[in-house]
Image (cartoon, helix red, strand yellow):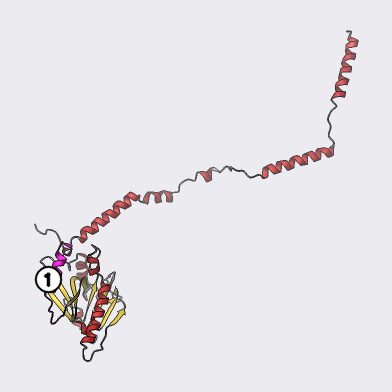
Amino acid sequence: MSEKDEETFNSVDLELQTQKSPPVTMSEKDEETFNSVDLKQQTQKSQEPDIHPQQSPSETEKPSTPAAEAKAETTPSPRALAVKAKWQTSAQQFKVKKFFVLRPGTLEQSIEDVKSLVDPTEDGAVQSVWLMAEVDHWNNEKERLVLITENNLLVCKYDFIMLHCQQIQKIALNFIDRVSHGTFCFPPNSFLKREGEGVRVFWDKLREPSFTSRWNPFSVDYPFCSFTYHPVRGANEQLGPLCEIQNFREELTLAAQKAHNRNPVPGKANGVLVLNQPILIEAYVGLMSVIGNQNKLGYCLARGNIGF
């Protein structure tokens, strides 16, 4: 093929290719439509919520603050709490077991001894026996066995170590005119404090204690006596009912009312007035009572070996 024929052939081939695949062109209107459709699809894809959002490092890994670390360190573990509770319970049981009234057979023997001292003709039959603590006018606690008979209220000072009744105070039930119950309170300028509640029994509302009796810690001529719970009331199921002062108040009120009806006192109003009010103890300093109550000097207690 000559050069002239080859050039002619190439030109013809290019013309055929251009005829077979004409260039694709797009008008301006079609191009705008295409661009708008493409933008709508992109916005729809961007509006779809992300199922697994990526959290920032500040949200996923929050540094522990010093307060949180201190709280975690100061919070005791359950094992430590259990050991502490067990230790407190053991210490409380050790303190309670030091009372001689808890020795096997001691309480039963003391009740029998006191009942044997009751005079059936003067006192009548024994209706109930109670184990309580008497609180005197100087806030001193004293361990007492209290008996309610048909005619009298017997407050017994009993030695649970030697198993011997040392003193009995008799109060005629038909002379009892008031029974108050409530929490203990002191004068505004007093340094003393006492928690809990008690019962106070009055038998001569016309007689007020004298000035010397108020300032005498050993005075016994007060026309009332106050009682509160014995420290061993929760030691076992047997002592619980014997130390319940509210049941004692109810039975004493009923027995006194019966005594008033059976043997009224001339010149006195028959009946018992029950008051729910604070029990006032007119003591201000009471250093002796603070030392005595903390060391339980008014109780028969095992105090260990004392010697050299």
- Describe the element under mark 1 as helix, strand or loop: helix
- 185 up-or-down from 102: above or below: below
Is 117 contained in the magenta span?
A: yes
Furthest toward the top, the residue is 1
Residue drawn at the location 11% of the way across and 67% of the way down: 163
**Residue to which mark 1 is pinned:** 113
Query: In which quarter of the view is residue 126 placed?
Result: bottom left
- 265 up-or-down from 132: above or below: below
Is residue 208 in sight in this rendering? no
Left or right, 308 with reference to 150: left
Query: In which quarter of the view is residue 252 placed?
Result: bottom left
Q: For this rendering, which residue is in front, 132 or 137?
A: 132
Q: Pinpoint residue 121: horizontal percent, then vertical percent.
A: 13, 82
Q: Pinpoint residue 22: horizontal percent, then vertical percent.
A: 85, 27
For the C terminus, the quadrant is bottom left
> Magenta region: which residues?
101-123
For the N terminus, the quadrant is top right
Is 113 contained in the magenta span?
A: yes
